[in-house]
Image: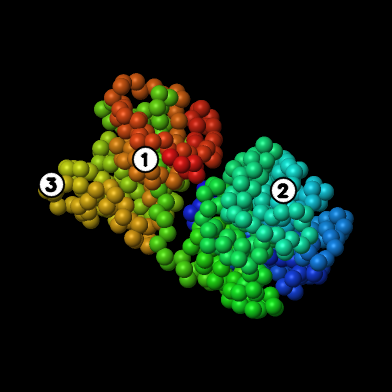
Amino acid sequence: MILETPTHKISFPRRPLLMGIVNINDDSFSGDGTLDPKEALEQARKKIQEGADIIDIGAESARTNREPISVEEEVFRLRSFLDHWVQLRDETKGADDEQISPALLSVNTWRPEVVEQIIGHEIDLLNDMSALPDDRNARLCAQHGVPLLIMHSVGQPKVSHTHKGWSDLMGSMIQFFEEKIETAKLAGLKSTQIVIDPGLDFAKQKDDNLLVLRELKKIENLGCPVLLPISRKTIIGDVLNLPDPCERDPGTVALLTQGVLKGAHIFRVHNVRACWETLKVISPFPPKLRIILNLAISADGKISTTRNSPAHFTSKADLERLLEIRKQADAILVGRTTLEADQMTMTTEGSKPWRCVISKEGNFDENHPFFHTDGGPRHLVISSDAKTPELPATIHRTDLSGFLKKLRNNPDITTLLCEGGGSLARQLFELDLIDEINLTWAPHTLFGGEDAPTITGLPGDFLPSSRHYELAKMTIQQNNEVFLTYYKSQLES
């Protein structure tokens, strides 16, 4: 799953994003708003330093017992912040290396008349609480390449809906999001530019909110990142009998933990530090192992010659790209045939990922340069009981699934890069485990030969079922090579 902003492509799963709230008004329900733009900017700076990946600014309170401010006043308040945001963003260092840097900016507004006047390159997300009654905000976002947040609610914003009842809240919510996502796409937005928000406390009562928190995974299946606005909400006050919103931070932390377990991707919060510390504490729980496949293909879809001999059919730029991709990896995995055909050493400058080779019989050449070059630790995965020579490597007597299980149980290994060959890639496709594919397409090359391997192994049967991926990036090189990056789609295989 991807969130694509004008400056970032954020791939999930990853540590959830924290959205720090900055209210440029004097009517915030939690009493932390300000009309002083300098004070608002300093609040934003502090929240980034405390761990916020996103700053969410709003000039108008969402409270329903207050009249809306004028369009002119809202634009003035927002512009007073936006005029100085970029400098503050670029000079402010975050709390750790996992944080999005530079921080992103979300603008919390819903009137198209306001959006039209403030949307621009410094804005990374439009946080729209209007429930998208028409496509005007979606069209404005599409024109500027800005992702749109769609919140679930009913009726007009700034109008109380405290008596709304639901016979099937989650069913209605799923239908709502399906319709609104389609509206946003027809307006020009991509699926990677849409965030959904279940709208806690908006047209929902205590039991409705608790139901949403229990069954959040039902909307995660829609394929868009889910923002959960948990901070100091009325539901916390209802459960704990706390009328003062400022006393609800412990309850906010509890909802943060629940949201993480249910798969939410972004959390909108006031007390960034407490939530950042919570994420740091629970992060040691084993993350999902992210698996990247990197291969080069010829114009006829082959990844090597019929004899698996070194082809060297791509440019120096392809090698440079591979070395950059390797820097993301904690471990690199190849098949023995690929290791020997390409005389690989799997070394990379500046890091020492595990260097792993899988073989059925384990008949390794002890004179191969792989065993005589410095780099990350060597691991050999052998799925038979065949004897092997004494080699400077850790031996794992298991199959691919067993080795991946060992990697998942190692907290130091979160990203695995697989560089071939086709038989290894096919096994991973069959297991439906590849999260990202990086392909270099060399249109000037034709290998020919029915026995030349493809990205899914030797020509033969189809995969058990389709595997769906979305094109995230395409770059055409001077020699007409094309660099392609795909991310796994949320469509069912």
* Residue occupied by mark 2: 132
204 or 432: which is nearer to us?
A: 204
Q: CA distance from mark 3 to mark 2?
A: 63 Å
Q: Quadrant of the C terminus?
A: top left
* Camera-nearest residue between 60 and 98: 60
Q: Residue at x 81, y 67 (%)?
A: 65
Mark toward the start of the polypeptide (1 vs 2): 2
Closer to the chain start, of discs 3 and 1, is: 3
Q: Which residue is mark 1?
A: 429
Name which residue lies at 26% across and 27% down.
Answer: 307
Q: Amino acid at mark 1?
A: Phe
In the image, residue 93 above or below residue 364: below
**Mark 1: which secondary structure?**
helix
> At which x and y percent is residue 58?
75, 61
Q: Position of residue 374 (x, y in %)?
A: 30, 53
- In the picture, the disc for residue 386 is 3
Under mark 2, the amino acid is: Leu
